[in-house]
Amino acid sequence: MTNYAILDIETTGGKYNEEGITEIAIYKYDGHKVVDQFISLINPERDIQEFVVNLTGINNAMLRNAPKFYEVAKRIVEITEGCIVVAHNANFDYRVLRTEFSRLGFEFERKTLCTIELAKDLIPNQASYSLGKLSRALGIPVSERHRASGDAQATVKLFQMLLAKDTEKKIIQESVRKEPKRQLEPRHIDIISQLPSVTGVYYIHKEDGEIIYIGKSKNIKKRINQHFTSEAPKSKKIQMQVVAVTYEATGSELVALLKESEEIKKNKPIFNRALRRTIFTHGLFSFVDPQGYINLKIDKANGKKRPITTFSNRQSAKSFMNKIVEDFNLCQKLTGVYKTSSACFNYSIKTCDGACIQEEDSESYNKRVTQIIDKNSYESKNLVIIDKGRDVDERSAILIENGVFRGLGFFNLNYQINNIDVLESIITPMQNNRDTQHIIQAYLRKNKNLKIINLNLNETP
């Protein structure tokens, strides 16, 4: 598992390479949670520039009894060992840290990642990429701005968001490639022992970091165990090549399904290509008959006509049709359930009001059919689907604008997300296609109690 040392350093200011460190905060992050941390004021053994005192609130008196750098150097080496160093403007923090170590005669070398560079690539067109302004735009809470701990915590949250937005998985693939001391033939049991039993998307990597398979599961540990114990030809090939398994917890099964679909299309892993399949075969369609009644019918989804909603197979489509006939008191004839030229069977047992023989007027019948169409299609709608998040204080948001799936993201429960500007910042833009429409509609059918926020995009936030 790749570990990251996410850090922030405050300095005295001054000439290039003559700055001293006044405070350091390091959070060791395993890609999902903080597993260790080190925070300390440091006596830089030199004066702090006046503008820095005003900016950070750290003054010479506060640092008089703080440890000197050589006293904390061992702890810094230990907590960053085997980690990729991550910082907002990594060049600065890494240079200052290396300079301090070289003064002690120690060569400090780590691979680095810069969250400014990553953010410019993954969250383009932001007004500013300073940590404070970027955090505000993305709804990341920052406590104690310009103090090492507050800034490092904000960088952890930002990095977590960048990992989620990186649908091409460049960060993870590069991290697997950079990771030190990777065995060529790891024992599968070691890989499984590091995986959690959570809902999310998993990525199977070969030696050079390339992703060879992407999948989703409600229990990642259990699913990988199945891959490693299966005798199927594809599983055998995966078992031969696997060097690492990384994962992204999603909390929500809907987020996992959408991420899996998007990332398979973008990354084209070799063992997913072998089983490219259409995830739906049938659709629900409507037409108006000569008598003015809206008819519903199940047909093959061939891409020629736009369905109201789609189904994985004919059987699930038929089950859906039978259920709406019963729930909405629809006519069997006008839904294709009962083939007849006269009244349908339900009319004879008084559960159809007679639309089949024009006894019920088309206006009142069509009202119920329109209700079904409206409920099962999000065409032209602006809404956010709220589902589980990765933690108890977090939720996921799926954004649909004018009937088009725009993408998804995560937000803290304390944060208002009905502001479209904030929403568009936290959302990872994703492709809208027939697969994503099917995934969302099928999930909404299955999960009736999801929170849905209707947006009025004409209102100024």
Image (tube, helix red, strand yellow):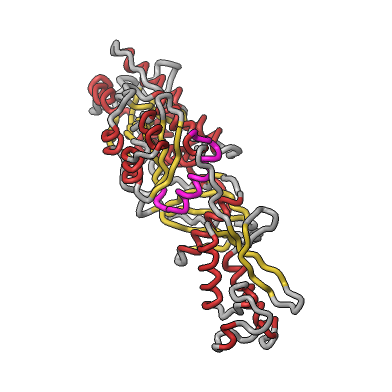
Residue at image point 37% right, 54% down? 393
For the stretch drawn in magenta, the main secondary structure is: helix
Q: Nearer the viewer, residue 144 or 230?
A: 230
Residue at image point 47% right, 66% down? 448
Q: Nearer the viewer, residue 283 or 51?
A: 283
Query: Where 395 sits versus 204, above or below?
Result: below
Task: Using the rendered view, name the quadrant where residue 379 is placed.
Answer: bottom right
* Residue most extreme to the right: 290
Any part of residue 88 in sight: no
Any part of residue 143 in sight: yes
Q: Nearer the viewer, residue 371 or 66?
A: 371
Residue at image point 62% right, 54% down? 404
Q: Where residue 334 appears, x then y in whole percent?
A: 65, 76
Quadrant assignment for the C terminus: bottom right
The total number of labels drawn is 0
Quadrant assignment for the N terminus: top left
Q: Is residue 253 magenta?
A: yes
Residue 81 horizontal side relative to residue 143, left or right:
left
- Which stretch did the figure color magenta? 250-270
